[in-house]
Image (tube, helix red, strand yellow):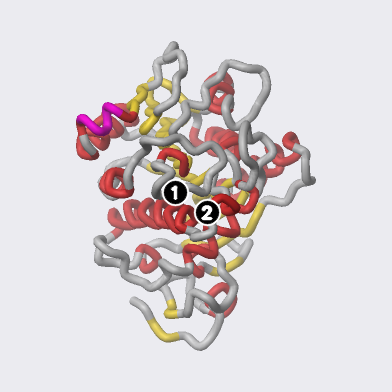
Amino acid sequence: MSRIHPGDQAFDNNSLYGTENEMPYSGVRSFMRRRLTRELQGVDFAVLGIPSDMSTSGRPGARLGPEAVRRASSQLSWGEVWPWGFDPFDRLAVVDYGDVHFRRGQVADMLARSEETAHSVLMQGTGVVGIGGDHLSTLPLLRAHARVHGPLAYIQFDAHRDTQANDAIDHGTFVHHAMQEGLIDPTASIQIGIRTFYDHNDPMTVLYRPWLREHGAAAVVQEIERVVGDRPTYLSFDIDAVDPAFAPGTGTPVVDGLTPGEVFDTLRALTNINLVGFDLVEVAPPYDPSETTALFGASVLLELFCAIASKRG
């Protein structure tokens, strides 16, 4: 339930639960106005920023994504979420854990520090939700989750498969390395919205853009449930899965993407998945002065929190 609270929620709210009414232009813009803290007692999920775009193949700017998504989320922090009819933060204790700190320009340092930070959170019984950063941000989070849960089922919304077989590690090869390292089980993994060419020579299920248009969101959800089953599942949402007409602020935009309706109809139906972690990546604010892309990204994360919270009604 929303309440009037005379203070800055990121610091002054004395409860991990609930949402206070606060103007979107004031206060510290933590994600969804959640408490800024490294204290995790009683916390269900910690939101972790990874401000890195060192592995982009095109336009940089995703290092600014975590801050932009947090700022945009203040437009959504009003309590009850439509069409769910409840505030997920009445049911889930969520905090903003801040950003991973690493030496600029040092990819290996970013990977190591992100993995260890996420693993330290997971070992305290708290789930991790990532905000990138380019899509390489997902690899250390997969490494951390696999250390706790073993090989993961994996859901990826994206325009690109990111499975290039290359010894180099970047945002176009990280899925290949995740399979090679045994972090994800490709037979229990699915990629959605793909509209670039890759040799499909692995057992991962791939739903290309025309398949979604022909079959619709309900069929997508059925395929997701069939592929991942009840296994511990990690979900990664690359904002370039969305058509750039709706989310232009990304480094590698690809036309003919998913529409908002297709995205949210799918996410809202993911209530039967054993989702242990998820992330939102590739928001690059410099290419979208309207901030619509960051708002879309914040909304994706909010819908996933709602899907999880719906099971705790």
**Marks 1 and 2: CB-CB under 8 Å?**
yes
Main secondary structure along the magenta-highlighted residues: helix
Q: Is residue 85 left or right of residue 106?
A: left
* Residue receiving disc 1: 247
Q: Residue at x 40, y 20 (%)?
A: 204
Residue 221 percent coordinates (x, y): 26, 37
Tell me the quadrant of the picture where the C terminus can be found.
bottom left
Indicate the position of residue 309 as horizontal and vertical percent values. 34, 57
Q: Quadrant of residue 273?
A: top left
Residue 297, label in figure: none
* Amino acid bearing label 1: Ala
Range of the magenta residues?
210-214
Mark 2, secondary structure of its residue: loop
Residue that carries the numbered disc 2 in the rendered image: 288
State left or right for residue 165 relative to residue 255: right
Q: Mark 1, residues whose alpha carbon is within 10 Å: few (<14), some, or many (≥20)?
A: many
Nearest the eye: 105 or 184: 105
Q: Say if 176 sits above or below 257 in the image.
A: above
The structure residue drawn at horizontal position 29% and vertical position 27%, both measured from the top left corner, is 210
